[in-house]
Image: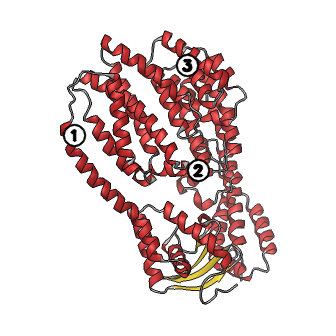
Amino acid sequence: MKAMDNGIPERFLEPLEDMARKVKEELDAHAATDQALVQKGLILYRQGLVKQIRYESHSITAAVLDVNRVQVSLNIEDYHISRCSCPAEDTCRHMMAVFFYLLAKNNSVSNWIESWRAPIKERKTLADLGLKRARDLMQTNPTKQPDYDNWIRTFTENFQQIMYQSGQYPKPYVVSDLFYIYLRKINAYAPIKKEWKLLYQLIGSMHTFMLLEQFATECKHSEKEIERHYLHLFQDLMEESSVMMERLSQQTVPFAFDPFIERLRNEATALIDHRSEIVQFERIQLYRRLWTQFFKQKSWREEELEKLRTLYETDASLSCTIGMAHLHFLLHDDQKVFQLIDEGDYDYTPYFFYWIYQLNAQKEWKRAEQYIETLLPYAIKYLEEEDDFHKCSDLVKMVLEVITPYCQQTKRNDLYEKVLTETLPYSFYYYDDFLYEYEQWEKWVDLQALLSIRLTDISQERLERLEKAEPTLLLPLYHQAIQHDIHLKSREQYRQAVKKMQKLRSLYEKLSLASEWEQFLEELLESTKRLRAFQEECKRGKLIHA
């Protein structure tokens, strides 16, 4: 259906508004690459280089007359699967140009640009606020005696004062700027004495983590918004806590710390006694690090376990389950760990890694073996249920990293290879390297064929090494590559096929299999006799006589 002169079909109006919102959210106004992308698309649109607009069932196609003419297809329902004939893999300037062309038909491009750039102005205002607040730091009085309640009051009051500007919930993209102003403010209240300062910062990190989580909930920021704009703040607080715990463990802790540590211990349970799924992994991870690195007394861990058991009776949540399992892990009661997570779903998968990392570091290989064997079925289930290729690839990478020390120490190449085979295709590059390193040539060739790896994607070095070691195994790779080139039916691909056929002929002759080559060539020429261009290239390549 062709475009109307005065606008676009009505059925496209609402999806276009949704697209405008999503593009605005996903392009970062602060990133130089995204700024350039928007600017270049704007120039192409304003120069009138978007032509031949057509409205299809779920997409809008157009030609963009850039240096080279390109064809753009915008999927109006999901712009992530939109396409452009230019080499760019993601959103390109041509797609932006078509987007602006459509936006101008029913909206204001200038308003969209102004709205998209609004975060830059807001963050500039916040930067000025940060400088102004910095002047207030000189007015603080860090010489007061350490007092747990005063510390908590300091964190809470400053957090509320700075994060809730003018009594309103801030946009996700300004949270980081506000947060760093808050950090500077509370750090000014830290005690002067080094040992007390470390404890202050540890307590501050945990309480700030919980304040930030509560803030995200109240602001109703989505998981996607949190992940994009300020998930790193939670991760930074977690890492900061680990650093403080490590430094505190390297010094003699004074008795005056005891009531502070007891309060921190009791309040840490709130990280587990929580029904929200916002930053759930980070919350559980902070809890586990506290009990691994700082709360080391056996009696403390047993007392906390009893507390969680009571909680578990009314709230058998994932958080509570992992919390209990971790305390059993620290108490070396592995069977209780496995009983708790028995028959759980794949949501448990990410929590195994910390346990195995700990066991690897302590060289407790027998215990590590149990956790690895328990992890693998969960990981396989995760791969079966998850449809995001990148998430699956990341998981497999983590699995391989965590089992490598155990497999190397115990010489369990069989286990390592088993994991590689069961996690294909996500483990392809690791398995490819593994088979190549151990010269398992037949399996290596089978792997290339299984995943349809093209001959041109294999390094020349590897092909030469395979030819030297097992030249017969190269034959099916060349056969497959030749058929692929011919199937594409273009003059250039026919030329590529002929080059491979010349190499294949040399291989057959090297292996004293000239008759097999002649039979293959005869059958191939017969099956392609209607492909005149291919036959001509074979003559040029002197594979057949004119």
Q: Is residue 94 above or below residue 239?
A: below
**Residue 110 position within the rendered picture, expressed as x and y whole percent measured from the top left:** 43, 76
Sooner in the amino-acid sequence: mark 2 or mark 3: 3
Residue drawn 53% across the image and 12% down it = 303
Q: Amino acid at mark 2?
A: His
Q: Name the spot of residue 416 as percent of width and height, x first.
A: 62, 34
Does label 2 or label 1 sit earlier along the sequence? 1
Per the model, the C-alpha gap separating discs 1 and 3 is 41 Å
Name the residue that disc number 1 marks: 137
Residue 322 sits in which quadrant?
top right
Q: Which residue is rendered at x = 47% and y = 76% of the image? A: 109
Task: Look at the picture and state if 334 lies above or below 357.
Answer: above
Instruction: Tell me if mark 2 has few (under 14), some (14-19) or many (20+) residues whose alpha carbon lies within 10 angstroms of its own.
Output: few
| Label 2 element class | helix
Q: Quadrant of the N terminus?
A: bottom right
- According to the image, label 3 marks what residue? 327
Q: Nearer the viewer, residue 27 or 482?
A: 27
Callout 3, which amino acid?
Leu
Q: Residue furthest bottom?
A: 5
- Name the residue beneath numbered marker 2: 390
Q: Nearer the viewer, mark 1 or mark 3?
A: 1
Quadrant of image for the C terminus: bottom right
Taking the spot 50% from the left edge, 9% from the top edge, the residue there is: 299
In the displayed image of the protein, which residue is found farthest to the front? 167
- Place residue 324 in its image quadrant: top right
Residue 353 position by quadrant:
top right
| Secondary structure category for the residue under label 1 | helix
Q: Amino acid at mark 1?
A: Leu
In this view of the protein, which residue sits in the foreground, 526 or 272?
272
